[in-house]
């Protein structure tokens, strides 16, 4: 049998785990990084930094629902499975520290494919100093399942809740919106004209290998200005509704202020979609949505914050709206029309029923 | 539409989560239990007790692999999904505190079934003061998936590693072995004679609704005697091999000392299986396997420990063997024969390939 043809069922759970630990390399060894005991006992033993609180979140990627191995390389998949989790810790203002990786694998899967998934996890973990401290690997009769649980820490004063938005706050968003949805549309073959290679790479990258805004979130929190923050996993409209509902207020955003990349606009035009749809409801952008206090001198403060974020991380920051005292979210169109913005966004089950 | 016919796809993710939080009741509200923020933000925010270390573990249950809804009620399933996780924290000597519950649900599943799963989780969580602080709920095109991540805490000196076994240690086990496998055999319809109702309930209970040995583990750790500990999820043979491999030693156990319930023996006899097989390789017993120092006066100490465990929890403790200085595990048969004991036990992928 060629090494490359080796299947999961040929080697058994314990040998597979040994190989995966090998692939993880330094990201499975956490000496001095708060890991008292990592992979290899009934539970990991961890030590958070003095005075910090623990952040915990899980996100599951399911084959046939969240990914398709004909679109996504196994390495991209591993990267994305960790990225969506890091994004949740970032959105709270935390520092991601430890991950537990659960895999459900068809016995017929190639071992090399599973190793590639782990290589993707390791690549992103290393970038953020995250240690893989455990998990569960078992055989799945059906789908490929990747479920990561992420643990992080944050100082008591450095946590951003989604419930902290205040009347008059300015609403900001990092990066561009709708790129992930544009990339997915491309992958699904709705493409009617050739995209420039650079545009294609940008859109596919946004969908298949999203970059969690961990450094950006940390810098924004350190500015001391953030009142509320969310990551945009389910689309801007949905996330903004979550912030205003949790905060007991409302919001108005301006359509023409929503940051769209030229690549997204080209892709949308080429298939006759309004790119606003993707920006508002596309989801999976993993950008940060935040509010900071609004007052006289606000535009200057936003400009300063935006400049320092751009300098430090290369990521842009756009002012897209205002927090209002009354419930609901309004969208102001370029022609001045104001309409209520439905929560919409990606909602599991409902979408899948259509 | 009758309320009972409501499907997951009819109500959407957000309404489903609201209903599930309702079912969790007090086990989703953790004020004063180290929960700064539970369900409802990007991540949970937790505060461990001063001076403790954090324990973290995940275990996934997959339909068609770990459970079958024609055997198991949804409530039992929820209970078991949490129980196997509590068992991991117990085996480290820890106190389970917070759980994150990830569900992959077919859109056609009845909402009432999902609520019952949560009722099972809530029942066991309440018993142990565990708070459900988050998770991920998404639609699964294939199997039903329940993946729980458990967080606990332990004092620095109160942690039991599987690597702590020492030469001459006595090997002990709580409760009875092989009951879960006997229960599964019954469920799979290999039953050739009627079991007494009490026996049947005992075996089915062991398989479908295992009781994690959290109190037992805590009491054993407090005795100060435990050198190494594991929970028996993959069968005694496999877990004992893990302890001796991690500890750099070996072990000898006596077949006639392995604790078997009369119900297990009756079930085994009725279908012509050697109950030792179930005790050694059956798995899913979730009993504790531990070692304590052996020396003169050991039998008396074991008797005292066993008596106090029985008094406090109703659970028995059996001396089944000794730690040896050289590698490998030996089984001594009633006739004095000594044979090497294969690691065997439940090994994902390999088993599923046969």
Image (spheres, coloured by chain):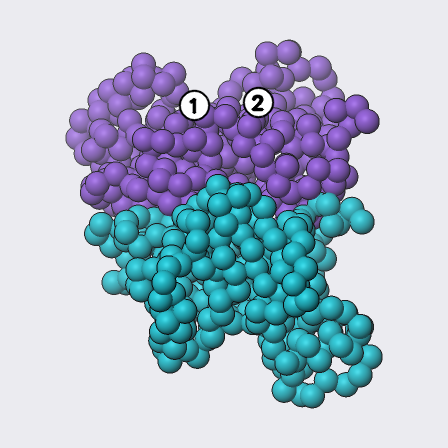
Chain colours: A purple, B cyan
In the rendered image, residue A107, in percent from the top left (x then y), is placed at 74, 42
Does residue B339 sit above or below A239 in this rendering? Answer: below
Quadrant location of the N terminus of chain B in the rendered image: bottom right
The mark that comes first in sequence, 1 or 2, is 1
Left or right: A11 with respect to A340?
right
Identify the residue at image location x=35%, y=26%: A215
* Disc 1 to disc 2, C-alpha distance: 17 Å
Along the viewing direction, whichever of B79 and A208 lies nearer the viewer: B79
- The residue indicated by pointer 1 is A127
- Report whether residue A169 is seen: no
Identify the residue at image location x=72%, y=84%: B195
In the rendered image, residue A314, in percent from the top left (x then y), is placed at 38, 16
Does residue B286 sit above or below B247 in this rendering? Answer: below
Query: Which SS class for mark 2?
Result: helix
Using the image, name the chain to which the residue with label 1 belongs: A
**Circles 1 and 2: CB distance less than 8 Å?**
no
Q: Badge 2 local density, few (<14 within 10 Å), some, or many (20+)?
A: some
- The residue indicated by pointer 2 is A205
Along the viewing direction, whichever of B9 and A79 lies nearer the viewer: A79
Identify the residue at image location x=36%, y=63%: B296
Along the viewing direction, whichever of B318 and A94 lies nearer the viewer: B318
């Amino acid at each position: 049998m060629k090494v490359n043809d080796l299947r999961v069922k040929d080697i058994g759970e314990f040998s597979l785990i040994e190989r995966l630990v090998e692939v993880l390399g330094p990201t499975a060894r956490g000496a001095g990084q708060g890991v008292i005991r990592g992979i290899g006992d009934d539970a990991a033993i961890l030590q958070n930094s003095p005075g910090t609180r623990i952040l915990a979140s899980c996100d599951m990627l399911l084959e046939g629902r969240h990914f398709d191995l004909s679109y996504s390389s196994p390495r991209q998949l591993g990267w994305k499975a960790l990225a969506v989790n890091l994004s949740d810790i970032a959105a709270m203002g935390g520092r991601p520290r430890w991950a537990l990786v659960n895999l459900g694998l068809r016995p017929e899967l190639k071992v090399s494919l599973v190793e590639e998934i782990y290589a993707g996890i390791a690549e992103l973990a290393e970038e953020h100093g995250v240690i893989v401290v455990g998990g569960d690997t078992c055989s799945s009769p059906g789908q490929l399942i990747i479920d990561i649980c992420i643990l992080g820490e944050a100082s008591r004063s450095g946590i951003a809740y989604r419930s902290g938005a205040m009347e008059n706050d300015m609403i900001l968003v990092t990066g561009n919106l709708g790129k992930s949805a544009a990339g997915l549309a491309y992958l699904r073959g709705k493409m009617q004209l050739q995209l420039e290679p650079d545009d294609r790479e940008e859109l596919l990258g946004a969908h298949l290998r999203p970059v969690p805004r961990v450094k950006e979130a940390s810098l924004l929190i350190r500015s001391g200005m953030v009142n509320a923050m969310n990551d945009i996993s389910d689309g801007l409209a949905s996330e903004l509704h979550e912030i205003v509902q949790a905060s007991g207020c409302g919001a108005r955003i301006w359509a023409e202020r929503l940051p769209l990349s030229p690549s997204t606009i080209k892709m949308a035009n080429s298939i006759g979609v309004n790119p606003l749809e993707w920006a508002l409801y596309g989801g999976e952008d993993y950008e940060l949505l935040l509010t900071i206090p609004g007052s006289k001198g606000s535009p200057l403060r936003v400009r300063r914050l935006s400049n320092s974020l751009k300098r430090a991380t290369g990521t842009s920051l756009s002012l897209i709206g205002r927090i209002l005292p009354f419930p609901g979210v309004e969208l102001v169109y370029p022609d001045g029309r104001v309409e209520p913005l439905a929560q919409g966004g990606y909602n599991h089950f409902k979408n899948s029923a259509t």
